[in-house]
Image: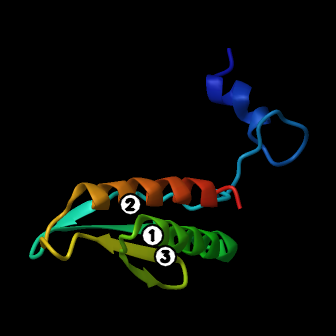
Amino acid sequence: MRSVSGLMSGYFSNSGPGLLVERSGLPIEITKNEWVVLKDPERMHRIYGFKGRPDSLRFFVEELLDYQERLGHHSEITITVNEVRVEVYTHGVQRITNLDKELAREADSIYQDSKEI
């Protein structure tokens, strides 16, 4: 009797026809990006990853800037080669308000859209 791995080996080989092909890498890099609350002053920040996707990064930043103009509330945006860091809080009260949470939700939505580019 053959083992399960023996039965399935043909499906995972790179030589010959098979239903599944083992890949050495993923087409995208998965990173855990979540909003983090920082103190002194209370503020939210998140880092969005764009490794190998400069057009997506550009789209994200432009859309976020346009949204902030319409909202009349702005975040601090730091751009590096593969990341965009967004930090937001309401300066007048030195803490997180509903406007900040709204901006964060929209930034997440724009980021999801940027993955399609």
Position of 34 compared to 64: left or right?
A: left
Q: Which residue is mark 3?
A: 83
Number of numbered discs visible in the structure rendering: 3
Marked residue nearer the N-terminal end (3 or 1): 1
Give the amino acid type for the residue marked by disc 3 in the picture. Answer: Glu
Residue contact between numbered discs 2 and 1, judged by CB atoms under 8 Å: yes
Dot 1: what SS? helix
Q: For the residues marked 3 and 1, what is the alpha-carbon distance in whole angstroms?
A: 19 Å
Question: What residue lies at 36% left-to-right and 74% top-to-bottom?
Answer: 75
Q: Is residue 81 above or below residue 72?
A: below
Disc marking residue 68: 1
Compared with residue 21, is residue 81 higher up or lower down, i.e. above or below? below
Identify the mark nearer the N-term, 2 or 1: 1
How packed is label 3: few (under 14 Cα within 10 Å), some, or many (20 or more)? some
Q: Secondary structure at mark 3?
A: strand
Q: Residues within 10 Å of mark 1 (few under 14, many from 20)?
A: some
**Residue 50 appears in which quarter of the rendering?**
bottom right
Residue 99, by quadrant, is bottom left
Q: Nearer the viewer, residue 38 or 69?
A: 69
